[in-house]
Amino acid sequence: MLKSKEVKLSKGFQLPFLSYRYLLVAFTLFGIIILSDNHNVSASSGTLTMSIPDSISLNILPSSSGTFASTSGTISVSTTYASGYTLGIKATSSNNNALINTSDSSKTIPSITASISESTFSTNNTYNDKWGYKPSKLNSSANSNFLEAPTSTTTTTLDQTSTSNSTANTYTITLGTRLTNATAPGTYENTFVFTVLANPTPYTITYNANDGASGADTTNMPTPNPNSSSTYADTVTLSNTVPVRDGYNFKGWCTVQVADGAACSGTTYNPDGGGTDLTWTLDQTASTNSLAIYAMWESARCSDTLYNCIATAWATEGSRVLTNDTDTNTGIQAAITTSNSGVFKYNPSTFGASSDAANTSDIYFYRGILDTTVGSYGSDGDNTAHPNTVVLSSASEKSSLTTSDTCWRIVRTTGSGGVKMIYQGKWTGSTCANATTNAQVTTSAFSGTSNTYRQIVRVGYTYNSTYATNTSQSGTIAQIFGTNSNPEANNTRSTIKEYIEDTWYSSAIGSSSGHDYTNMLEASAGYCNDRTMNTSTDWTTPLAESSTIASTYGTSGQQAYYFGAYPRNVTTNQPPSLTCGNKYSQIDRSTVDLYRYVSGSTGVSNQLKYPAALLTADEAAFAGSGYNSSTIPYHANSFLRSGSNFWLLSPYGRFSGGNACGFRLSSYGGLGYGYVYNTYGVRPAISLTPETMAANGTGTAADPWIVNP
């Protein structure tokens, strides 16, 4: 009599780090059924059921002519929530090829060594004193052949199914032996292990770029694609790779193909949250699972005013305002890190009212690095959350840009709603991410030659030529540098101003360039050459305009002088400012030192011949380029860093018995100084009007906002 016992394996029970599910069952000839523990259970839900016999009896009746005897038992397997299973058999680690007499282990019946039919086995005395087993497969009647004993190292597959079956599949396992008088009477047994392994669920995920027939515009697609695999789990996590398409923002995946900007009419999967995120639930009863999903895109190109494009792109971060740096410039510099780099709103109550011609619009500036990439100055800026790149071109599409088109990095907006930018080289054919000499228009002295380093007037963007001699002479500050009421005293242009206005401007973005931008640049934009003077004894009280100073240095130990940007950016008692002049004193040089464009001007006095000049040290400080000292840190990967030294507009000072110096942005990313006759890079700055439109682009280095003339 056969008895059965049902054993269930739950796929909901989980052991860590294991990915298969087995049911191991042992039974013996004339023995008690041995059930093993459940092993390697996955996290999936559902059940796999296996019914087995308690015992199988085989009466051994030896005879002289040989007697064939057999007995059978059944195994039943059913599944729920699984796409089929694999049923296998193997022997235990010992006695895998013999039936052993339980009374005398020296008496054994060895297994047949090859598959033979039942009729051959039962009638051919060649197989006397041999045994074998005969499984049935696929719910059919018993197979016609008896097989040799399974080994202890290899599982022999009895059946494989590919569909779920709630009605049990029943298998008949037959043991047979041919016996003669040479076989010792008694009880013989062997132990087998039956394995039931629920099939993994096969699946295929196909990621479609959904960007046109060729799909050539999209990069960074998930790989492999399609992804064909299988799993024992209920769910599959889709790739969190975010595709990149030129000029578009990725909005997630949809199970229905939709047009750019359209809402998903199917199921949404989104690496950034929303929809059902990235979890796809499988049908484990299906022979395979297929998922085709399509990228959803929203145009990131801006065809509004450039200011509005920036305001939209910077909206989230632009609400941040620096408010805790009232007294010193240490605060604005010290906290610059990768994590808090970004867009800030300028706070005039902290840093002083801007000297921009109008202050009707909020001023935003970028501080620190543009993305999480460090050590790659000049190439930062492709993070779509922080776009700040413009190209000036007659082209309306990126594909039509030429290598003569000029690239610019947005430093800040202006109080009138304009956009102030610094030169970043030319379009390379694929990017505006230029570095070192490719990010500048030339190299030049700020003013004069090595024979003119004694002349303190040379720190001026324009200067009074009367005092541009190396002979010992002195005068008042008003006489040497001019005053608000007498800017005309500055009757000579500096070397760098001459180059920008006479050599570079017209051929690059002026009347000879093929796309004249002069009318699109803010005539009211001010460029500050702050020559408010201080001594190291009192940073907060500048020297009076009537103070007499030596225009050239004499002997060592002579009084050292420092200009207005020095205490704001080198010492620790004042913050940088967009106010042209020193807000802590009554000295007012906000007219004579603030240069603006005047059409038709020759560029002397406090006038610009064309609307282009240089950034100030204060603007560089707001961008993250602090002075290189133990107390004033700088950000080595500030987006302004080009990898080469380049001039800034702010005067630095004249050392005791030493040279006249101006501020530079050093190759390592911090503020520094250079003698006015040193040759450094020239990176002009310009300010686009509030009405300037962006024709196309997303503002990254690889897809800049295109501004047409």
Image: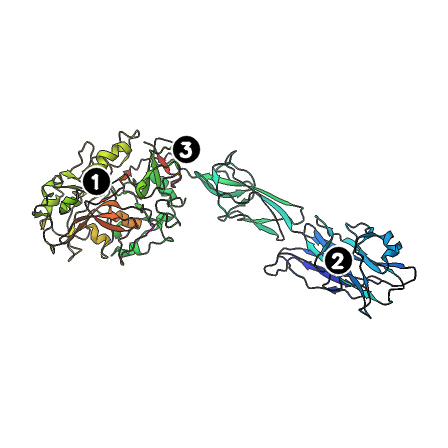
Q: Earlier in the sequence, mark 3 or mark 2?
A: 2
Q: Earlier in the sequence, mark 2 or mark 1?
A: 2
**Image height check: is 396 above or below 574?**
above
Find disc 1 in the rendering and name its residue.
496
Residue placed most toward the observer, 603 or 661 = 661
Q: How busy is the neighbourhood of tag 3: few (under 14 within 10 Å), some, or many (20 plus)?
A: few
Q: Quadrant of the C terminus?
A: top left
Three-letter amino acid code at the position of disc 2? Pro
* Disc number lying in front (3 or 1): 1
Q: Residue 463 carries which label?
A: none
Q: Do the residues labelled 2 and 1 touch (CB within 8 Å)?
A: no
Kindly tell me whether residue 353 is visible in this rendering: no
Q: What element carries label 3?
A: helix
**From the viewer's perspective, is 574 left or right of 338?**
left
Q: Which colour scheme is used?
A: rainbow
User: The residue tagged with tag 2: helix, strand or loop?
Assistant: loop
Residues drawn in magenta: 631-637
Q: Which of 303 and 85 is in front in this view?
A: 85
- Residue 12 picture location, percent across and down: 64, 58
